[in-house]
Image (cartoon, rainbow, N blue to C red):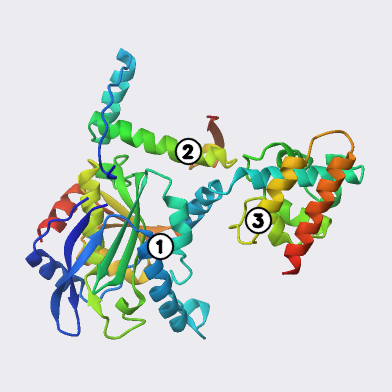
Amino acid sequence: MADNEKRTMTLNLTVREMAVLEELAAKKDLNKTGVMRLALRLLQAVDAKIQAGHKLMFEDEKTKEKGELLML
Amino acid sequence: MKLTHSKDWYARRIALEGDADIGAGTMAAIRESAVAQTQAVPIDTRIAFGTFVELWRRDRGWDAVKLAEVAGVNPEEILEIERSPQSEPEPNAVFRLAQVFEIPSKILMELAGLIEPRTPNLRQAAVRFAARSESVAALNPHEREAFEAFVSAIAETAKK
Amino acid sequence: MTVSQVYLKKIAINQLVDASLYDEITDQHLAMWKSTWVPAMEAYCQGRAEAKKPDDSQWDWKWKAEGWRPFLKYHSFSIVCEKELQGLMLASDVKSARVQDQFGKPIVYVELLASAPWNRSKIQKPKRFHGVGTVLMAAAVQLSIDMGFKGRVGLHSLPGAVSFYKDDCGMTPLGNDAAYGNWIYFEMTEKQAAEFRQK
């Protein structure tokens, strides 16, 4: 199997989920497939860090306050 | 990904580039790779690492708090090392434990999955040890034998 | 893996010669890095003060490869010419643009970009080949287009390369970035990418 061979999947989303997907696509200037692929890469990368014992945090640039985003 | 620029395009752009330096990137990229690379370390050496720490202190009748005190680390760190092989231990904690155990820190770091595996036979010794150890209140003769065999294996590899 | 026909300029004959761009850094490329780049770099660094060594003299591409290969977000590239490794690049596709006009939109971020020691004027005068930067930037821009990012690219330039990214590639400098060794962060917009591809 060549590395760039593609596989197709049918994605069933709720009306709300599809709305969010469309909103993100517009915001990010991507098509819906592009958004899903981006999400997959991010999840893979975040999951690896959490598995290694790291926490996913956001920091307020002004106050330097850190808040834990999520535990996956 | 395929590039399809014409030869002319390269001629024009390479003339612009000329003799310039072109490097990009920073150590930040390397740090991220370090995290991902630790993921590739077999989890069984970390299980052996945690078991080793637990059996070492139980052999002396110490609880996790006492070991933490002697090593100068947080008790939570000891418990995480002993119970969570999927978590990456703090390098500083591993270094301090190596000093308490009086074994080379490089070997303990390798067992803990913090540095690239490079000591031959260490992984096999670790896996054998982990497989033979059971978690009971005091070291039973079976565990003691396994523990002493592993300590010898570490001493042997340290000599090389 | 895809191989593209590209060109480098061979200085000894002052002409373009055929080269190959691979969209993957293979074990073979890493072996070439180890057997040719590393000794040349070590020879250059011998006896030099830390401040005078190239910023990437300690980069271990083989060790890094073990880190990046499991992840979808990383893309690696190599250039081979006259059977020797001339350039390497690692890029990722999950970072976002900082330039106001494209703020928050995904970009291809060049994590690492380096040319062979013999292609650097500080190490060898004259260089063997010109054009490694051009080919690798072309690859980054094409990857961005393939990903649907319309040519948007970001990177932190090593100090000596600022004029290449600013003047030759036409990228926008966004100042020194304390989070990244204080190197200057550059970004290429959609428009700049279109110009780059045409010029």
Mark 3 touching mark 1, by CB under 8 A?
no
- Please tell me the numbered disc located at residue A46: 2
Question: Camera-side residue: C79 or C143?
Answer: C79
Q: Residue furthest right?
A: B61
Give the residue drawn at x 43%, y 46%.
Answer: C70
Identify the residue shown where x is 36% and y is 76%: C117
Tell me if label 3 and label 2 are in contact, CB under 8 Å: no
Q: Is residue B16 left or right of residue A19?
A: left
For mark 3, what is the residue? B110
The amino acid type found where label 3 is placed reads Glu
| Residue C43 image offset from top left, x and y in percent | 45, 83
Q: Chain of mark 2?
A: A
Q: CA distance from mark 3 to mark 1?
A: 33 Å
Disc 2, disc 1: CB below 8 Å?
Answer: no
Q: Secondary structure at mark 1?
A: strand
Disc number for residue C183 = 1
